[in-house]
Image (cartoon, rainbow, N blue to C red):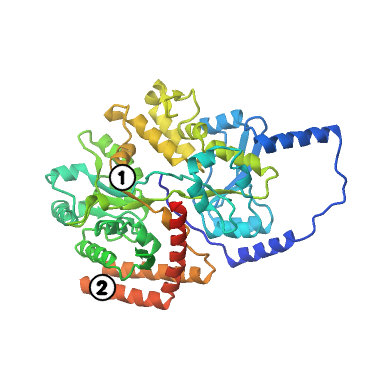
């Protein structure tokens, strides 16, 4: 599962607040009160001792906690108003109260910290935000609970847990959509109607793509966009993976390319430069939409849904393409819909060594538990259950008895007649519960989902699952060694990284709009010179150190 990655950085005011709180935490909290030795207190202590030995039993005692998604775009649906969370609330006695970001996540979190009213759980990106909270003493480590509750160790795995540990050696993060096998959706989608009308030509290499896009432009003119790269340069950048064996798009994401035991400059790399020259050629010949760098997702959807795109490439094209496939078929029963193709490549490159997307064992983002809750272990017990088989079945497909009865040998749900007869309601439930998937178990969900789909008649199979199993999961790069490479924003390396990112963004735009190949190379030469002046080598040295440490952890 692949979601859009967004990052929010703390302001200097927040850092100041952290300092104040740290100072406050150093005060003496001792007490001269005598211990309570009443029978009632003794029973409570026995209950706590039992919990310490065997763990908290979810469902016996209510668990209430507040939850804050640290994203401008995130709004949690009301807990308990859908079938899945209503079942959890009733049967597991868990109630979650949302704290909205108000479309200004950074300011919201700053305010909560300053007022000492932290939420019990924060859902956010890995990295500097987590570490600043930890350094301020606001997070609870999970280490003492890993052996009490079985699912995190079982499904996340020791090596991934080690990648998630903080510099103090402790674990504070519960990962979301972590995995031990490939997942992801990056790749190329083709409009089958246009493809068949043009004679279904070979579409395997970049030479094939160039010829095909020219045919599209010649036949359909401005009524069809030959190549739509989605938003934020995604569909252009992923093309780099086809210009050499084992050169994943990951290297662009990190702005660093491995050479032997070091990470080196992206700007001077010949593979990256060749891709930029090709992209410039497509852009100059109006084969790529000319608002490629500024278009919104809504604009992409409108073209796809209205059958006006020949080739669509993006980091996660399947969600848009799946709905587009159903919409064009609904408006025209004879329309063959959309399909995905094997990732394109340069002539001579091994098609089985092309990686337009990537995956990492640590997954997408994380949940952290703050010191605000009086019983943080109870929250961990819930999250651990949530990421296990019963929790995942419930939040993904709804509770047992609604659309499924019993499970197969692999723990996947056995669907009943209502699952097929009430497909619209099933889709509505799944769209709602997607909002609650904070520690998704990729391996459990994807393998069960794929196995279930294969039992359905072809006309009932899910469009996304078909192409994930046939193409995208097979063509995503394992980027686990490249996690945690981003320095703190306010560190020397973090300041340098922001400068390099700005240089990359500016030079990419200029290179795409360049008049010819010679001008593209000059732009990239200048980007390299500017990057070196900004301290690129210092950043690369910092990233190399972490990369090498990750490699050692993953090899253990």
- Residue hosting label 2: 521
Relative to residue 421, is residue 445 depicted above or below?
A: below
Q: Quadrant of residue 533?
A: bottom left
Viewer-side residue, 438 vs 151: 151
- Residue hosting label 1: 474
In the image as oriented, which residue stretches furthest toward the front? 556
Relative to residue 547, is residue 331 depicted above or below?
A: above
Viewer-side residue, 404 vs 379: 379
Q: Looking at the image, can residue 71 be seen? A: no
Instruction: Give the percent coordinates (x, y) of residue 261.
Output: 38, 65
What kind of element bears circle 1?
A: helix
Relative to residue 419, is residue 471 depicted above or below?
A: below
What kind of element bears circle 2?
A: helix
Apparent side of residue 213 relative to residue 255 in the rendered image (left or right): left
> Which residue sits at x=26%, y=36%?
329
Earlier-in-chain disc, 1 versus 2: 1
């Amino acid at each position: 599962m692949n979601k859009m990655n967004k990052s929010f950085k703390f302001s200097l005011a927040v850092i100041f607040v952290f300092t104040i709180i740290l100072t406050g935490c150093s005060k003496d909290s001792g007490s001269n009160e005598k211990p309570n030795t009443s029978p009632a207190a003794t029973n409570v202590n026995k209950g706590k001792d039992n919990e310490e030995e065997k763990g908290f039993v979810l469902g016996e005692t209510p668990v209430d906690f507040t939850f804050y998604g640290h994203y401008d775009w995130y709004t949690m649906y009301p807990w308990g108003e859908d079938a899945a969370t209503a079942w959890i609330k009733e049967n597991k006695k868990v109630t979650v109260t949302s704290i909205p970001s108000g479309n200004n996540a950074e300011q919201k979190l700053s305010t909560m910290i300053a007022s000492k009213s932290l939420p019990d759980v924060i859902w956010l990106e890995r990295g500097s935000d987590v570490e600043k909270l930890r350094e301020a003493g606001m997070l609870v480590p999970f280490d003492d609970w890993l052996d009490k509750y079985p699912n995190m160790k079982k499904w996340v795995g020791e090596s991934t847990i080690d990648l998630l540990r903080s510099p103090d050696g402790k674990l504070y993060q519960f990962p979301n959509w972590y995995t031990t096998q490939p997942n992801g959706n990056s790749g190329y989608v083709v409009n089958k109607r246009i493809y068949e009308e043009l004679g279904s030509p070979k579409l395997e290499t970049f030479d094939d793509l160039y010829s095909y896009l020219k045919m599209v432009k010649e036949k359909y003119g401005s009524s069809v966009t030959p190549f739509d790269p989605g938003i934020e340069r995604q569909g252009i950048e992923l093309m780099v993976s086809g210009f050499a064996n084992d050169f994943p798009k990951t290297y662009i994401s990190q702005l660093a390319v491995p050479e032997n035991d070091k990470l080196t400059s992206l700007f001077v790399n010949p593979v990256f430069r060749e891709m930029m020259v090709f992209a410039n050629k497509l852009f100059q010949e109006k084969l790529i939409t000319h608002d490629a760098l500024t278009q919104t997702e809504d604009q992409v959807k409108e073209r796809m849904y209205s059958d006006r795109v020949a080739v669509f490439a993006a980091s996660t094209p399947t969600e848009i393409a799946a709905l587009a496939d159903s919409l064009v078929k609904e408006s025209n029963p004879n329309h063959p819909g959309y399909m995905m193709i094997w990732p394109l490549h340069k002539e001579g490159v091994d098609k089985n060594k092309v990686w337009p997307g990537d995956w990492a064992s640590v997954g997408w983002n994380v949940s952290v538990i703050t010191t605000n809750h009086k019983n943080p272990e109870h929250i961990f017990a819930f999250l651990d259950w949530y990421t296990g088989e019963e929790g995942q079945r419930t939040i993904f497909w709804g509770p047992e008895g609604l659309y499924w009865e019993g499970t197969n040998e692999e723990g996947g749900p056995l669907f009943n007649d209502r699952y097929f007869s009430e497909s619209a309601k099933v889709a509505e439930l799944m769209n709602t519960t997607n909002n609650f998937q904070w520690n998704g178990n990729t391996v459990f969900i994807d393998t069960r989902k794929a196995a279930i789909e294969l039992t359905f008649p072809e006309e009932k199979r899910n469009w996304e699952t078909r192409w994930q199993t046939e193409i995208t999961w097979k063509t995503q790069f394992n980027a686990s060694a490249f996690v945690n490479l981003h320095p703190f924003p306010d560190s020397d390396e973090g300041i340098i990284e922001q400068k390099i990112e700005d240089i990359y963004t500016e030079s990419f735009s200029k290179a795409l709009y360049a008049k010819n190949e010679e001008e593209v190379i000059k732009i990239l030469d200048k980007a390299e010179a500017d990057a070196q002046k900004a301290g690129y080598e210092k950043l690369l040295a910092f990233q190399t150190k972490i990369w090498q440490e990750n490699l050692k952890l993953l090899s253990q």
